Image (spheres, coloured by chain):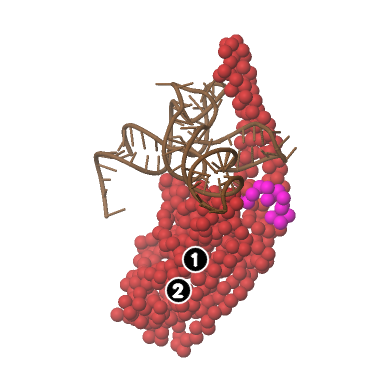
Chain colours: A red, B brown
Amino acid sequence: MLDIKFIRENKDIIATGAKKKHMEVDLDRLIELDDQRKELLKVVEEKRATQNEVTKNISSEQDSGKREGMIAEMQALKAGLQKEEDKLKEVMKEWQALMLQVPNVPDMSVPEGDDDEDNQEIKNWGQQTQFDFQPKSHIDIMTELDIADFERGAKVHGFRGYFLKGDGAMLSYAIWNYANDFFLKKEFTPMITPAIVRKQHLYGTGHLPNEAEDVYKTQDEDYLAGTAEIPTMGYYADEVLDKSQLPVKFLSFSPCFRREAGSHGKDTKGLIRVHEFYKVEQVILCEASHEESVKWHEWLNRNTEEFVESLGIPYRTVVNCGGDLGQGQVKKYDIELWVPMEKKYREISSASYFHDFQTRRFNTRYKDADGKTRYVHSLNCTAIPTPRILVSLIENFQQSDGSIKIPEVLQQYMGGKETISKK
RNA sequence: GGAGGAGUGCCCGGAAUUGGUAACGGACCGCUCUCGAAAAGCGGCGGGCGCAAGCCCUUGAGGGUUCAAGUCCCUCCUCCUCCGCCA
């Protein structure tokens, strides 16, 4: 959500930004509606003012005749007021729907482009793994080692179902525990968040109204969060923080649920694209300054890069192009890990900042040094998603005998084990 | 799921004639006073419109009754007490 004043004063900037993001929004209609809103508001407020004043006098009026007259007068005024209020309500409905459509303005440094094909590599770390034997996919490796079961996953869950089993499960625990130790050194507050959330919080983060298809819903009209970003951002909704509390740094762990409604044909096998997974997510709330946002954005992304480097998995970082940005995002980096069997880098992390786009919807503010309340700025970045990280980890660390070498930093979390091999 | 009680201004307390238009106190911020601090005093301390005076909105959310709703009615949410169920 942007400020309507800002929209009115910067229509061209927003229109250009929307175009860069390949998003449609009818700003002229919005401004037209806003004119109507202002006009109606004026009429309504004037009538309410009269009503308030006369009504106040009614209670102190002793003469019952006069009193009756005033009441009758107010009854008439009320009928007119009601009509105007109904009109206003009608205008507000469309106004609000349009306001939810206005995308945040992408940063100047965001490259032009249609989709993820046009994202630009800004960093490349490590060597693409070379094998002196015929490498296998994570699906084959895990199945042969009996550390994942996709057939039974499909039997129990359905399409995109999976079981992690034995050392496959243990490897996930190891990654979670290692990630906790790694990131908590950077002064995050760890959180385990609810995965079932109320609708309003998905509007807050910007997942609604535009991504409704991709979200699971309960019979109570609650939603299953696709990321801990949603509950974590909701944590301080409708609250006013003190400047001294900022920046707030949360490391949130939660299950994540995604319908993947728009990607039926894609990544139909294995652990790349699944309906449910676990994720450790970094979330930051900082002061309302672009410089602060940029600083923490770089920091968040670097944290995850460092984490991947410590595992020794080759990766690259891209800056997302305009067409690959979400509605609220100002700028986004993706970290992509090398997947040998696909001969491609695949995304495992997204670092984005939003300025006050989200916090305006969440109504999360802070009291600044000058005593003014402002909306905080919000950012988030994946720390680590499981099981997707396993795809690269396993494929890059496979050995000729079909076993998996466990990255050194994870070994202590696997009881000192160095390889996962066939029993 | 059932029965009863409660929810008040950025925060914490806490009033409001059994319908008459949200007191007051604390905390916090600014100023005065002070060498400095404390104390005391004054002002501020939700949102919108307006150059301003001022006006409108805001008592968990949304509706309704009424000239007028914190107060009455309906739906929902949250918390507390009890019953039932339960990892």
Can I make out residue A149 in this image?
A: no
Q: Report in which chain the residue with disc 1 lies.
A: A
Q: Compare residues A270 and A416 and report the one nearer the observer.
A: A416
Q: Residue at x 41, y 55 (%)?
A: A194
Q: Position of residue B40 (x, y in %)?
A: 51, 40
List the single residue furthest toward the bottom.
A132
Q: Which residues are magenta?
A: A1-15
Q: Residue at x 47, y 86 (%)?
A: A131
Question: Which of the labelled discs sits on residue A244, or is there none?
Answer: none
Residue bearing the label numbered 2: A391
Q: Secondary structure at mark 1?
A: strand
Q: Is residue A178 above or below residue B71?
A: below
Q: In the rendered structure, does residue A8 fall within the stretch colored magenta?
A: yes
Q: Horizontally, is A231 left or right of B44 in the view?
A: left
Residue bearing the label numbered 1: A382
Amino acid beneath label 2:
Val
Q: Residues within 10 Å of mark 2 (few under 14, many from 20)?
A: many
Q: Is residue A134 above or below residue B18?
A: below
Amino acid beneath label 1:
Thr
Which is more N-terminal, label 2 or label 1? 1
Q: Residues within 10 Å of mark 1 (few under 14, many from 20)?
A: many
Q: Position of residue A144 (x, y in %)?
A: 36, 77
